[in-house]
């Protein structure tokens, strides 16, 4: 665990970016840059973080940074890593990828899969705000069941997204990555520890960090950290790490806060509380519970599962 | 060696730092040979064998931005899959060299040669050269590194070789010694790189207030390339004795009727032209080596006394008045005021053999038009069933 005062005061990301007030990904980027101990090269996928941090002729980054396309970030990182290896500089820099959930769960999954299989040495950070927020809130493979997005509207017949969220870490673990973890931007200490662990590993590592989006989730921008915490405390987003295939729970949540307390402040779930959506709310709860039980079992935790 | 092997050998002699590639017929032999070099320790190259062409070129862009010399190869669907990355490579000014073993595009699926792959991406901001045979594929690949990496240019280059006709045909290829190749190509000296000691932002969001200026710089880089290409071909000639320029002209001086083409058809065209010359017909051949930037001035000069030109395209521009190559010549006509009559034939699609009799037919038409007949068919498909 790191202490706040041990963190570098220098800001390698920002100030000066144009991300929204209360933007979860912005905080993710900022604390990532504080977590990294070696000089870093950042590879950023298309998305909010990219468009709002490097509007030419300005940049919010004080490290070498490159944006290329939406779906190829892991491939670009592979090329950078291969090049550094050839130059004998592989140990001099951390290659860090920032990609959103769309760029990771969906369009970038193939490139990520290839790069994980080839074992390039980089740390891949997926900042997950659970939809395509940059294009204006469309569903992604990371959008939870029941959530409103502009492509899964809360209609009179269909009430939000009809499919479940993908298991990104499970997919990465299946590739045999040495280290993968989930994190929440609110638990900065846990996140920083995980970023450092990931960066220290020789080979690819993936950190899946929940980073709430006030605009897309429809909540007060002052509540980002509150919601990022509630996501964990309600068991909606379990925090765990997987080291060489071994799952380990990072936060046990023995007395979970009712899921409603996470859902209610968010406009994207408002329709679930209408009487005609009762079944959908139950389904979402069932999925959250099922995921928690599955993960905790993988972590070898007993007595934390719901019956 | 065959054309693919010649290209792989050139990349080896250029001592590329990183190769990232994905197999596709008829390019595959290039990456296979290169893999052999890596496996046998004949090169000190990082070979990143990726999961798609999209990732192949993406990895090349990443490597190039760190200052490495980078090579890849593809064909057809692979080039089409790379499409958006092609613009990225030229826009980020990464001097990647890519061999394209030209092959038709689906549908229907076909693995044989035409130029629809490269023509579909011709406006991607890459310098594009076309080889006629394995020798030229080797020579251009070697020269391409020096052209691409020149700081005045800093643009990616495709070396096009006709699928199977060149890629798989065994020919005698004269290669340079490793030392001579090294002297020619030298080392890459990148101006701007992803460097932790000197942090820079690459690929920033550029809005209407600056985007056009980036594109203007690309236009300027492309315009800067002909003298650089000329200097490289001059140096290459001194080392190898083989002479290259933007265009290769054959029997053009007093020709009334000329056929223009890209790639391997040129050999057949020259053979036919020689035979017609013996019959007293004043015919010649123009082969375009350097398709992008298009050698407008040189084409106009060569055509100044030519009465009629038949342009062979090996790809259809659906719905357009002419195929791609002929459109460029038509533009040249407008820009320079040359009065050469023009007609366009499309042939050799999907590997359809272009026979000497096909070429002779084109020459005969050109001669008729040159003699005063009006161009009755400005665009036609040749060698196709009704």
Image (cartoon, coloured by chain):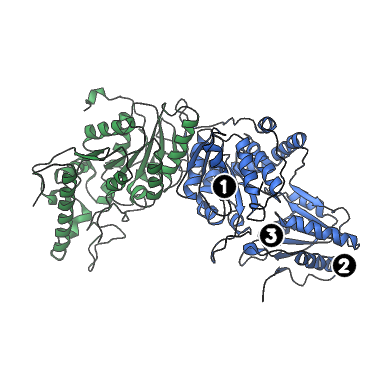
Chain colours: A green, B blue
Secondary structure, mark 1, is: strand
Is the C terminus of chain B in the top left, top right, bottom left or bottom right quadrant?
A: bottom right
Q: Residue at x 86, y 69 (%)?
A: B372
Q: Nearer the viewer, residue A1 or B243?
A: B243
Chain under disc 3: B
> Compared with residue B248, is residue A80 higher up or lower down, i.e. above or below?
above
Chain under disc 2: B
Q: Residue at x 18, y 37 (%)?
A: A250
Q: CA distance from mark 1 to mark 2?
A: 45 Å
Number of residues whose C-alpha sits closer than 10 Å to that of mark 3, classed few (under 14), some (14–19) or many (20 or more): some
Secondary structure, mark 2, is: loop
Residue beneath label 1, please? B73
Residue beneath label 2, please? B371
Number of residues whose C-alpha sits closer than 10 Å to that of mark 1, classed few (under 14), some (14–19) or many (20 or more): many
Mark in front: 1 vs 3 = 1
Q: Is residue B58 left or right of residue B9?
A: left
**Residue B167 visible in image:** yes
């Amino acid at each position: 665990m790191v202490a706040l005062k041990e963190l570098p005061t220098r800001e390698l990301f920002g100030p000066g970016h144009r991300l929204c007030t209360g933007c979860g990904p912005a905080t993710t980027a900022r604390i990532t840059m504080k977590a990294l101990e070696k000089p870093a090269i950042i590879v950023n996928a298309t998305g909010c973080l990219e468009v709002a941090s490097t509007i030419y002729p300005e940049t919010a980054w004080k490290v070498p940074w490159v944006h290329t396309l939406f779906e190829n970030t892991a491939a670009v990182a592979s090329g950078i890593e291969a090049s550094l290896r050839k130059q004998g500089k592989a140990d001099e820099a951390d290659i860090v990828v920032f990609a959103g959930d769309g760029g990771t769960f969906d369009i970038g999954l193939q490139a990520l899969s290839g790069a994980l299989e080839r074992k390039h040495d980089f740390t891949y950070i997926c900042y997950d705000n659970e939809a395509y927020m940059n294009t204006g809130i469309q569903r992604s493979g990371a959008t939870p069941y029941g959530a409103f997005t502009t492509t899964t509207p809360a209609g009179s017949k269909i009430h939000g997204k009809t499919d479940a969220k993908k298991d990104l870490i499970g997919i990465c673990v299946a590739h045999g990555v040495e280290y993968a973890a989930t994190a929440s931007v609110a638990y900065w200490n846990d996140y920083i520890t995980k970023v450092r662990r990931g960066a220290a590993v020789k080979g690819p590592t993936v950190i899946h960090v929940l980073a709430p989006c006030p605009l897309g989730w429809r909540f007060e921008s002052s509540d980002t950290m509150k919601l990022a915490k509630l996501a964990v405390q309600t068991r909606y987003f379990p925090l765990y790490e997987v080291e060489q295939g071994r799952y380990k729970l990072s936060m046990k949540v023995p007395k979970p806060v009712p899921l409603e307390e996470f859902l209610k402040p968010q406009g994207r779930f408002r329709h679930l509380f209408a009487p005609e959506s009762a079944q959908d709310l139950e389904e979402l709860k069932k999925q959250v519970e099922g995921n928690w039980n599955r993960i905790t079992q993988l972590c070898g935790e007993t007595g934390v599962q719901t019956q | 060696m065959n054309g693919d092997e010649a290209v792989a050998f050139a990349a080896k002699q250029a001592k590329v730092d990183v190769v990232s590639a994905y197999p596709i017929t008829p390019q595959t032999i290039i990456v296979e040979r290169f893999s052999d070099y890596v496996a046998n320790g004949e090169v000190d190259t990082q070979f990143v064998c990726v999961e798609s062409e999209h990732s192949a070129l993406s990895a090349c862009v990443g490597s190039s931005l760190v200052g490495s010399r980078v090579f890849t190869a593809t064909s057809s669907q692979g080039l089409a899959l790379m499409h958006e990355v092609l613009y990225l490579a030229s826009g980020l000014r990464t001097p990647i060299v890519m061999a394209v073993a030209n092959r038709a595009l689906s549908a229907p699926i076909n693995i044989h040669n035409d130029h629809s792959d490269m023509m579909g991406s011709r406006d991607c901001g890459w310098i594009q050269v076309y080889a006629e045979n394995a020798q030229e594929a080797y020579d251009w690949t070697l020269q391409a590194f020096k052209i691409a990496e020149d700081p005045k240019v800093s643009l990616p280059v495709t070396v096009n070789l006709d699928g199977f006709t060149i890629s798989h045909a065994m020919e005698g290829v004269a290669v340079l010694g490793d030392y001579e190749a090294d002297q020619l190509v030298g080392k890459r000296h990148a101006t701007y790189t992803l460097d932790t000691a000197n942090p820079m932002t690459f690929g920033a969001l550029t809005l209407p207030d600056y985007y056009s200026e980036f594109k203007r710089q690309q236009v300027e880089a492309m315009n800067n390339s002909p003298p650089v290409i000329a200097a490289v071909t001059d140096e290459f000639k001194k080392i190898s004795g083989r002479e290259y320029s933007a265009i290769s002209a054959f029997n053009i001086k007093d020709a009334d009727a000329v056929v223009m083409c890209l790639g391997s058809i040129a050999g057949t065209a020259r053979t036919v032209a020689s035979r017609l010359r013996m019959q007293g017909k004043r015919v010649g051949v123009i082969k375009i080596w350097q398709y992008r930037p298009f050698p407008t001035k040189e084409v106009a000069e060569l055509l100044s006394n030519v009465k009629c030109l038949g342009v062979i395209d090996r790809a259809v521009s659906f719905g357009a008045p002419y195929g791609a190559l002929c459109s460029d010549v038509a533009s040249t006509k407008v820009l320079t005021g040359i009065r050469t009559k023009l007609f366009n034939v499309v042939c050799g699609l999907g590997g359809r053999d272009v026979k000497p009799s096909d070429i002779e037919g084109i020459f005969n038409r050109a001669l008729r038009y040159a003699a005063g007949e009006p161009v009755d068919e400005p665009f036609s498909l040749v060698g196709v069933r009704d």
